[in-house]
Each structure stands twice: as structure tokens, then as C-alpha cells.
Image (tube, helix red, strand yellow):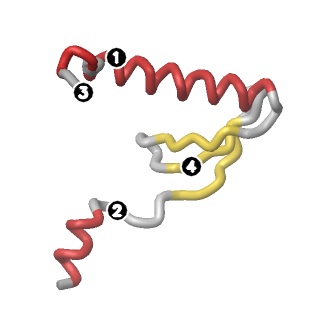
Amino acid sequence: MERENYITDEMVVKRANAAVRLELEKLKAMDIPAVIYDPKTQIVYYEYSDGTRVEAAKRLRKGRYSERIAKEA
């Protein structure tokens, strides 16, 4: 495949964002709760089609996997 046939990084990001937006809209239409992670509070929520959020879980571990393994070794 030649280099001219590749898409740019910006186009990949736009397509990924569009895919996520479409999936969230589909879940709303089907009245299925979406699972959303809030990085500020580090809590996982179920978000229903009417906009309500129910806490599902809190973050289990902190730090990157490689950092946790380095501490144990």
C-alpha cells in the first residue's frame, strides 16, 4: 500500500470520536445505560437516556500497571 492511501492522524481521531458519539446515541435510542468513566472523580457511572447517573464503581487501583509491577519487584 502506498503512502498516499493512508489517512492522517486527525482523520483517525475524527472518525473515532464520531463512532463513540454514534454508539452513545444508539444506546440512548435503545434505552440502554451507557457506562461512563469520570476521570476527575475517578468513578464509573451508568448514564441513562433521561440523563440520570448512577454510580457503578470506584477506581480499584492507582498508577500505571508498569509502576505497580516495579514496586512489587
Q: Which residue does the numbered mark 2 point to in the structure image?
A: 62
Disc 2 is placed on an element classified as loop
Across and down, in percent, residue 55 comes to: 65, 49
**Looking at the image, is mark 2 or mark 4 earlier in the sequence?**
4
> How far separated are the C-alphas under marks 4 and 3?
41 Å
Q: Nearer the viewer, mark 4 or mark 1?
A: 1
**Looking at the image, is mark 4 or mark 3 earlier in the sequence?**
3
**Looking at the image, is mark 3 or mark 2 earlier in the sequence?**
3
The answer to whether 36 appears left or right of 12 in the picture is: right
Residues packed near mark 2 inside 10 Å, few (<14), some (14 to 19) or many (20 plus): few
Across and down, in percent, residue 32 comes to: 78, 38
The answer to whether 48 appears left or right of 63 in the picture is: right
Identify the image quadrant of residue 30: top right
The answer to whether 41 appears left or right of 46 in the picture is: left
Q: Amino acid at mark 2?
A: Lys
> How far separated are the C-alphas under marks 1 and 2?
32 Å
Q: Nearer the viewer, mark 1 or mark 2?
A: 1
Disc 4 is placed on an element classified as strand
Q: Nearer the viewer, mark 3 or mark 2?
A: 3
Residues packed near mark 4 inside 10 Å, few (<14), some (14 to 19) or many (20 plus): some
Q: Does residue 33 sit above or below 55 in this rendering?
A: above
Q: Residue at x 26, y 71 (%)?
A: 68
Q: Which residue does the numbered mark 4 point to in the structure image?
A: 44
Residue most toward the front?
A: 1
> How far separated are the C-alphas under marks 3 and 2?
42 Å
Q: Nearer the viewer, residue 48 or 23?
A: 23
Disc 1 is placed on an element classified as helix
The answer to whether 5 appears left or right of 24 in the picture is: left
Q: Residue at x 53, y 25 (%)?
A: 19
